[in-house]
Image (cartoon, rainbow, N blue to C red):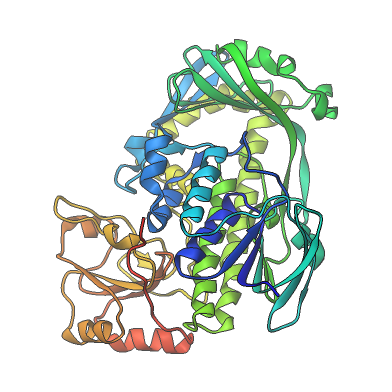
Amino acid sequence: MNRSDVLIIGAGPTGLVLALWLARQGIKVRILDQSSGPGTTSRALAVQARTLELYRQLDLTQTILDQGHQVPAVNLWVRGEPTAQLPLGAIGADLTPYPFLEIFPQDLHEQLLIERLANLGVSVERNTQLLAFDDHGHLLSARLRGADGVEETCQAYYLAGCDGAHSTVRKTLGTGFPGGTYEQVFYVADVEASGPALDGQLHIDLDEADFLAVFPLADPGHARLIGTVRDARAQHPQALKFEDVSQRALHHLKVEVAQVNWFSAYRVHHRVAEQFRRGRVFLLGDAAHVHSPAGGQGMNTGIGDAINLAWKLAAVLTGKATQSLLDTYEIERIEFARRLVATTDRVFSFATADGPIANLLRTRLAPLLIPRVAALESARALLFRTVSQITLNYRGMPLSVGSSGHVHGGDRLPWAHDADSDNFASLALIGWQVHVYGDTSDELQAWCRAHQLPLQQFPWHPAHATAGLARNGFYLLRPDTYVALAERSADPKVLERYFAERDLTPWNNGVPKP
């Protein structure tokens, strides 16, 4: 019987990243999808800074930067004129190596991931459907129907449901998916156009009518229009055409459309699954949470799910951790998903609310207040940290311990660099590692050597203090580069206790090969 370590259902970005991370670690994966091929159109566009940071482990970041488009600023429009600008580069320059919004459409994204998987000998099984599965406690069996209509039964130690909002995996588990559906219909139009909003930046309209944003693409004169419809036309989204919504693009943002390459209309839900794990089955991406496109968070959150789960599955499957480690996947990701759905819902509701008071707030007060708020460095930094997902942390959770400087266990490691060093350079390594800023003890160095735990030691520099790092302590980084343990001392017994209490063994596989 065909057996794999992990059976992945769904070959969107979430499933592909999970497969790629696991395959890089020598884990046997099988990934299948009902579709006949990868998508040729895409709703998801934005690759956030945190995703670009995490992608260094998979050697994907530079390729995406080379092939995509960097958005340096966001512009807000009211009554046909730009009223406020948020320069992303100026806001995030000291926070991340990627202080911008990267536009890399999902169809290109999937093609890149599929190519990298193929280099590892893994291909997506197309036109293949999951019919049913059973969790036997020690492994799973799944019944599949292939492209030829023939059914087969396969086995796996774990099953990952990355099969979207209508997830067969979630429905088979019987897991609830509470939430609601927005009354507005969303549309996406891929256009060739001209006008002031086609300047390579992101433009958003805050007028009384429906929401509209113009996302630039890598090719000059090409853009993706994302908007909403909420009047009588929203009753039949399948009948909508670009001509039904084009007047907003033509008049409110002064976009002159020369050609429409494709157009799609759809409804959006805001939901979070009641469970992200049951036994040996996991839910990730849209199968676990869906929300409005506000802020470009959906695809990035699914990728974050995949990376969070991937290192834990790899550790358990290679005997470096017990099954209890897998409990932390739901603990860490479900809380973030709930906060994200609530936040994007509030932002989208403000941007699209109807009525005289809502229109007054959006078109009169917001243009006055947003530039003033944007002038505050702290407010700009908070906005960038939130949208870019670099503020996401796992503080107070089972794998997160201690604090040192302004950094707590569970935090993303702050970026600190100077002319001679960059503390993110070692984050291409897949595995556990220790960072020290300043001096450390001989005992800590010896313990790390004995356990083959890479120790990255940086001579103390004022940039480290600026980033919130403490001098002469240490930071233990998880395989997904989040801080597991932040410690003020240089005592290796703290490290010993951390791993022993969680039945973990430190491991690393070095820098991944291209």
User: For residue 79, what is the image quadrant?
Assistant: top right
Image coordinates for residue 162, horizontal then vertical, percent: 66, 57
Q: Is residue 318 above or below residue 19?
A: below
Query: Residue at 44% of width from left, 68% of height from top?
Result: 410
Query: Residue at 43% of width from left, 43% of height from top?
Result: 384
Image coordinates for residue 429, horizontal then vertical, percent: 34, 65
Tell which of 8 and 313 is nearer to you.
8
The quadrant of the rendering that contains the C terminus is: bottom left
Q: Is residue 508 above or below residue 165?
A: below
User: For residue 471, what is the image quadrant?
Assistant: bottom left
Q: Is residue 284 above or below residue 69?
A: below
Left or right, 157 with respect to 152, comes to left
Tell which of 275 and 473 is nearer to you.
275
User: For residue 151, what is the image quadrant?
Assistant: bottom right
Total marks shown come to 0
Query: Residue at 42% of width from left, 69% of height from top?
Result: 479
Q: Is residue 432 visible?
A: yes
Q: Is residue 176 visible?
A: no
The quadrant of the rendering that contains the N terminus is: bottom right
Image coordinates for residue 138, horizontal then vertical, percent: 68, 84
Q: Is residue 312 above or below residue 147?
A: below
Query: Residue at 38% of width from left, 40% of height from top?
Result: 65
Image coordinates for residue 325, horizontal then vertical, percent: 55, 78
Tell which of 5 and 490 is nearer to you.
5
Left or right, 49 with respect to 190, comes to left
Tell which of 59 and 245 is nearer to you.
59
